[in-house]
């Protein structure tokens, strides 16, 4: 089963000095059970590619599916089956783990009580 598939995936940013190709024509197939790493120097497009695959950035070219959901046609379904944790961490570096879990729950449109309950479940399950 294919979990992630891209064909010609691209992202160009418009800057005052002209267009910048951050990602150019990425073709990728990742199947269930595979472990994949994106390696490259700073500026190679690794983070931009992941942000596109998690719908945080819209591709300017190409196509992709995540868990069978089209990235452009059904971004809500893509977000429902994946998560993204940036290397810089959470929303606020001064939040406690519980506060960060509550914030993330609210960002996913959980009610306050539901977010609190889910945060407690996660904290207990992870021994936090």
Image (spheres, helix red, strand yellow):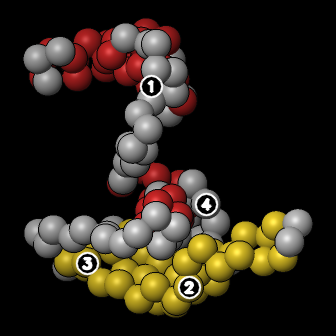
Q: Residue at x 37, y 11 (%)?
A: 96
Name the residue: 46% across, 85% down. Answer: 26
Badge number at residue 24: 2
Q: CA distance from mark 4 to mark 2?
A: 14 Å
Disc 4 secondary structure class: loop
Quadrant location of the N terminus in the rendered image: bottom left
Q: Are marks 4 and 3 in contact (CB under 8 Å)?
A: no
Residue 86, horizontal then vertical, whole percent:
42, 44
Q: Is 91 above or below relative to 113?
A: below
Q: CA distance from mark 3 to mark 1?
A: 29 Å
The count of marks equals 4
Earlier-in-chain disc, 4 versus 1? 4
**Would you name the residue on which mark 1 appears?**
105
Question: Which of marks 2 and 4 precedes in the sequence?
Answer: 2
Q: Are marks 1 and 2 in contact (CB under 8 Å)?
A: no
Residue placed under numbered mark 3 in the picture: 30
Does residue 9 appear to the left or right of 31 in the view shown? Answer: right
- Point out residue 113 in the picture as x, y percentages from the top left corner: 43, 9
Q: Nearer the viewer, residue 68 or 48?
A: 48
N-term-proximal mark, 3 vs 1 = 3
Frontmost residue, 96 versus 122: 96
Q: Earlier in the sequence, mark 3 or mark 2?
A: 2
In this picture, is 55 found above or below 105? below
Q: Residues within 10 Å of mark 3 (few under 14, many from 20)?
A: some
Q: Quadrant of residue 68?
A: bottom left
Q: Nearer the viewer, residue 1 or 44?
A: 44
Residue at the disc numbered 4: 57
Marks 3 and 2 in Cβ contact (< 8 Å): no
Q: Nearer the viewer, mark 1 or mark 2?
A: 2
Q: Secondary structure at mark 1?
A: helix
As helix, strand or loop, the secondary structure at mark 3 comes to strand
């Amino acid at each position: 089963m294919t979990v992630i598939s891209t064909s010609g995936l691209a992202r160009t940013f418009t800057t005052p000095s002209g267009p910048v190709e951050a990602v150019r024509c990425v073709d990728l197939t990742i199947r269930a059970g595979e472990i994949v790493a994106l390696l490259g120097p700073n500026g190679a497009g690794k983070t931009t590619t992941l942000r596109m695959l998690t719908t945080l950035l819209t591709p300017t070219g190409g196509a992709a599916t995540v868990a069978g959901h089209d990235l452009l046609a059904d971004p809500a379904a893509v977000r429902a089956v994946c998560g993204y944790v940036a290397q810089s961490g959470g929303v606020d570096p001064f939040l406690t783990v519980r506060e960060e879990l509550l914030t993330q729950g609210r960002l996913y449109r959980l009610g306050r009580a539901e977010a609190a309950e889910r945060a407690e479940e996660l904290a207990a399950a992870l021994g936090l």
